[in-house]
Amino acid sequence: MGERNLQLSVAGKAALVGTYTYDVGSGRYQVSPGYAAIHGLPEGTEETTRAEWRTKVHPSDLPAVEIGFEQALAKRQPEYYCEYRYLRTDGEIRWIDSRNFISYDHDGSAPRVIGANIDVTQRKATEAALEDHKASLADALVAGKVVAFEWDAVTRQTRRSDNAARILGDGMGGLTGPRNEFLKRVHPDDRAGFKSQIRQLSPGEPSYVLNFRFRCRDGREIWLEETARGEFDGTGRLLCIKGLTRDITEHKKAELALGERTLQLALAGKAALAGSYAYDNDTEIMQISEGYAAIHGLPEGTTEIARSRCLADVHPDDIGRVGQARSEAFSDRRREYVVEYRIKRGGELRWVESRCFITYDGEGRPERLVGVSIDITERKRVEEQQRILVAELDHRVKNVLATVQAVAGHTMDASRSMQHFVAALDGRIRSMGSTHELLSHRRWEGVPLSQLVKRELAPYTTASNTEIDGPEVLLSAEAGQTMAMVLHELVTNAAKYGALSVPSGRVSIRWRLPHNVDASDRLVIKWQEIRGPVVVAPSKSSFGLQVVRELIPYELGGEIDHVLHPDGVRCQLEIPLAKLCMGSSQNNGPASAPANCWM
């Protein structure tokens, strides 16, 4: 249990486990991400205070926790454990199992406490459920496991049911000798309590329930549970005791095993890809948990293994770092160290984080090491993904800045005045920002064409002035940005000079795909304005018209037919599907096109 508690104290960052370091003098905690998650602190929190912690501990639990900690310091105990309820900021109450290792200076002061907090809410719920079902479970085990007995207080003789011999051993069935013969076989450590319970029987308290160990004649030691009731005469004199004796050996073993397993799972848990270990430095034979065996791909049921065997699976490029971390910790007489390394398991490489606590003998030699190993492969993958995303973001930002610079330059060249320039540039930058917002919301995994169209038209749309129709088409991030710029110019011109500038005007945007789509086909988009003012062609082409007529061919290899017809602007775009990249779907069945291109 002592070794297990040490393992718990360094459980580290695993699911439902959080570690912390507490500076007693300043009252400040340095906490792990796991601690912040368990306690409902904002993501990224690395520091908090004991004063803040006190405000969240359940008022019914805080006094006992504080007193226990003060007593531990007063007695210079190296370890301190407690359980309490914690009220998170989201209103949820969680049960916390707190396990602490206290360091003392030569003068007896305790400047620093290292600990691990485990969220045991689920375990508490399980314990409550087990208590609720305990009675029914006992009834289910009655067959072949229960002995009926009656002890006559006058004759001092005991009678038991015939199956007693099978449970308690030969000579214990039927009519037996004095009660003392039975008591002699009760475990010495349990005998005094057994006798005391019987002596306390009275008409007011006639019943008892006892759990005790019993030594059978054949050498077996079993656990028994005796439930009995005394009968008394009118003067209060005990006449007899009648009851049931049940063999609860398997139940006790299961209960103890369940308790240990629950602690393991609550701290490190196989499901959380975390496992504990312990070994003596002189033998280096490791005692390991199931979670550790699972992480390292060892056969199920492995509980002991040579450390050299585990080191054999460490990646050759990391084995030196593993040895160096331990050697430096020994040399500096550190109590703990952390090292990350890769292991070969089943043909794949897995990342492991090992957190180890060291105890030293009286001469300062490393004596025993206990700790926890955590599979952090997924975390490493996320870190690599973040690195790639940051690089991609840097690339995108540079592209955006270049685009803004180009748009600003062309807008200035085509502007009649500074006021016209500011208004035009503001609208175009807002459109670009809106498109970026939409792409960012979708994690840059493409954007539906319909959303782009609706977003650009939104400032001018009424109940009857727009018509949008077409199958779902998912544009790539690059195609979406290009299409958004073209749509912005079409919408802006329609709002200033075309169909959207008058109440009677109407804009229709439709697009279609071939029935049997393949990568060589094209998306066709038609823009048409009707019932607007008479369209007059400008004396010279504006930057907006240049965007509409030149951007699609240049960026997406498409074709565009833009006509300033007197009855209303008409524009048809034809874009190769291969340039759109993200794809589409139609009502008439699935499309056949490049992979990962269709909604």
Image (spheres, rainbow, N blue to C red):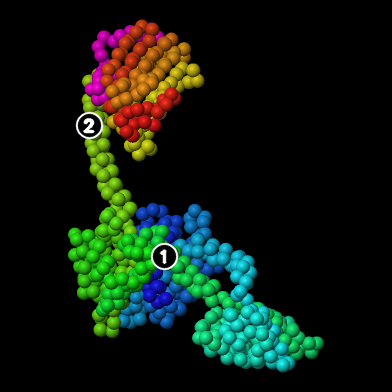
Q: Residues within 10 Å of mark 2 (few under 14, many from 20)?
A: few
Lower sequence index among marks 2 and 1: 1
Q: Is residue 208 visible?
A: no
Q: Is residue 143 left or right of residue 110?
A: right
How many residues crowd mark 1 within 10 Å: few (<14), some (14–19), many (20+)?
many
Q: Amino acid at mark 1?
A: Leu
Kind of residue at badge 2: Ala
User: Where is residue 195, by image quadrant?
Assistant: bottom right
Callout 2: SS:
helix
Asked if residue 26 lies left or right of residue 146, the reply is left
Which residue is depicted at the point 36% across and 54% down? 44
Viewer-proximal residue among 495 and 345: 345
Magenta span includes 127: no
Residue 15 in the image, given as x and y percentages of width and height: 40, 59
Q: Which residue is mark 2?
A: 402
Residue 423 versus residue 299 in the image, above or below? above
Residue at the spot x=36%, y=20% of the render?
A: 514
Q: CA distance from mark 2 to mark 1?
A: 52 Å
Residue toward you, 256 or 115? 256
Q: Nearer the viewer, residue 490 or 221?
A: 221
Q: Is residue 549 magenta?
A: yes
Dot 1: element = helix
The residue that appears at 39% across and 80% down in the rendered structure is 76
Q: In the rendering, which numbered label is found on residue 267?
A: 1
Number of callouts: 2
Magenta residues (range): 533-557
Q: Say if 572 sits above or below 24 in the image.
A: above
